[in-house]
Image (cartoon, helix red, strand yellow):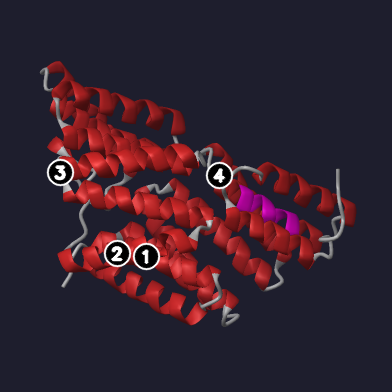
């Protein structure tokens, strides 16, 4: 039913790159082909090569370079009159904005990308841009607003037999079910995503699905060993492709699994590692989650009640106006866990 996964963001002279290509290799080849296109006066080709460069920088956590690259790709595509390439550049910019926690900008850029992609007749860009909007809402915790869009995009991806997009949609829906407590449904969806991704040779999607399965095994079944085993498998895939963001989230999840098992010192170490990784790539959502896990671990290791209260209060303040509703709920739950919900810390 599903063919081999492909990476539509690798365009022009870079279409031969695999969805599993190491990001450092993608960056090196992308820059080389971009320079060749610039030297030979081919702006449309330069714009499409620049898209791969922007995406490689983004996934490597090099935010400043990614921001410069997608904007350059957009300007070059506009110069060439290539509406589809302009749409893809906007998609990259919107995805970067979401990664940086700039949600209003992400909504704007991804909405423009979807509109322009549709006008240009690029059904894949339209689909990826709508998926980006759905993921933005899901990350913010607005499940009611984007649940139907996730289901719509899943149906479209299944109809076209697009493995990578199907896996993405399944994982997004699974995460919403997991966060609302329907662990059995979430597990089934993550399991299906893992099977499709593995058959389609989509390492990135497979790593995220394994992470989701590990989470459910830990929280529902208390199966720490199996959860850690799946996370180790996922980490190997992340490292093979230099997936910085996915690796940081893997480490954060390993911290969650260890924390739930009462292995608080090991959890502390993993949260500290994840926190440093998220800060290096300017990933505010991941940073907040790692800070939360670290605060809880330190509290279990004997940190003073006042210090824990102050840290959680500071974290709550830092999230005000961020749009990260789900993370804010987790912080409030942590305050309840440690009996701090009635306390006010200034």
Q: What residue sits 18% from the left and 29% below the top? A: 33
Based on the displayed image, in which of its 4 quarters is residue 119 positioned? top left
Give the residue pinned by disc 4. Answer: 278
Give the residue pinned by disc 2. Answer: 152
Which residues are drawn in magenta?
288-296
Q: Nearer the viewer, mark 3 or mark 2?
A: 2
Q: Nearer the viewer, mark 3 or mark 1?
A: 1
- Earlier-in-chain disc, 4 versus 3: 3
Q: Is residue 86 left or right of residue 140?
A: left
Give the residue pinned by disc 1. Answer: 148
Based on the displayed image, in which of its 4 quarters is residue 16 positioned? top left
Q: Is residue 213 left or right of residue 252?
A: left
Q: Relative to the observer, which residue lies in front, 203 or 229?
A: 203
Secondary structure mainly formed by the magenta segment: helix
- Earlier-in-chain disc, 3 versus 1: 3
Crowding near pointer 3: few (<14 within 10 Å), some, many (20+)? Answer: some
- Asked if the residue under mark 1 is in contact with the one under mark 2, i.e. CB atoms within 8 Å, the reply is yes
Residue 183, position as x, y percentages in the image: 51, 78
Crowding near pointer 2: few (<14 within 10 Å), some, many (20+)? Answer: some
- Earlier-in-chain disc, 3 versus 2: 3
- Earlier-in-chain disc, 1 versus 4: 1
Q: Nearer the viewer, mark 1 or mark 4?
A: 1
Classify mark 1: helix, strand or loop. Answer: helix
């Amino acid at each position: 039913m599903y063919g081999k996964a492909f990476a539509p963001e690798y365009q022009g002279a870079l279409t031969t790159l695999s969805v599993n290509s190491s990001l450092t290799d993608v960056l090196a080849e992308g820059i080389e082909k971009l320079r060749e296109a610039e030297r030979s006066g081919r702006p449309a080709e330069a714009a499409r090569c620049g898209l791969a460069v922007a995406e490689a920088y983004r996934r490597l956590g090099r935010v400043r370079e990614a921001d410069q690259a997608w904007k350059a790709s957009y300007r070059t595509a506009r110069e060439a009159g290539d509406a589809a390439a302009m749409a893809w550049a906007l998609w990259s910019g919107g995805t970067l904005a979401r990664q940086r926690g700039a949600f209003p900008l992400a909504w704007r850029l991804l909405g423009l990308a979807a509109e322009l992609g549709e006008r240009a007749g690029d059904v894949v860009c339209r689909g990826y841009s709508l998926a980006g909007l759905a993921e933005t809402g899901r990350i913010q915790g607005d499940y009611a607003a984007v649940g139907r869009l996730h289901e719509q995009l899943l149906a479209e991806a299944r109809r076209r037999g697009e493995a990578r997009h199907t896996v993405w949609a399944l994982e997004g829906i699974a995460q919403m079910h997991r966060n609302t407590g329907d662990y059995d449904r979430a597990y089934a969806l993550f399991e299906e995503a893992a099977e499709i991704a593995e058959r389609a040779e989509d390492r990135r999607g497979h790593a995220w699905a394994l992470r989701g399965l590990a989470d459910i095994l830990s929280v529902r079944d208390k199966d720490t060993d199996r959860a850690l085993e799946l996370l180790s498998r996922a980490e190997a895939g992340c490292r093979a492709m230099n997936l910085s963001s996915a690796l940081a989230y893997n480490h954060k999840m390993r911290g969650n699994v260890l924390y739930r098992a009462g292995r608080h010192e090991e959890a502390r170490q993993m949260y500290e590692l994840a926190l440093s990784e998220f800060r290096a790539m300017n990933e505010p959502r991941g940073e907040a989650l790692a800070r939360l896990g670290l605060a809880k671990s330190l509290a279990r290791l004997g940190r003073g009640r006042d210090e824990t209260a102050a840290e959680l209060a500071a974290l709550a303040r830092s999230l005000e106006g961020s749009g990260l509703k789900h993370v804010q709920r987790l912080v409030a739950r942590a305050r309840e866990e440690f009996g701090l919900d009635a306390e006010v810390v200034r």
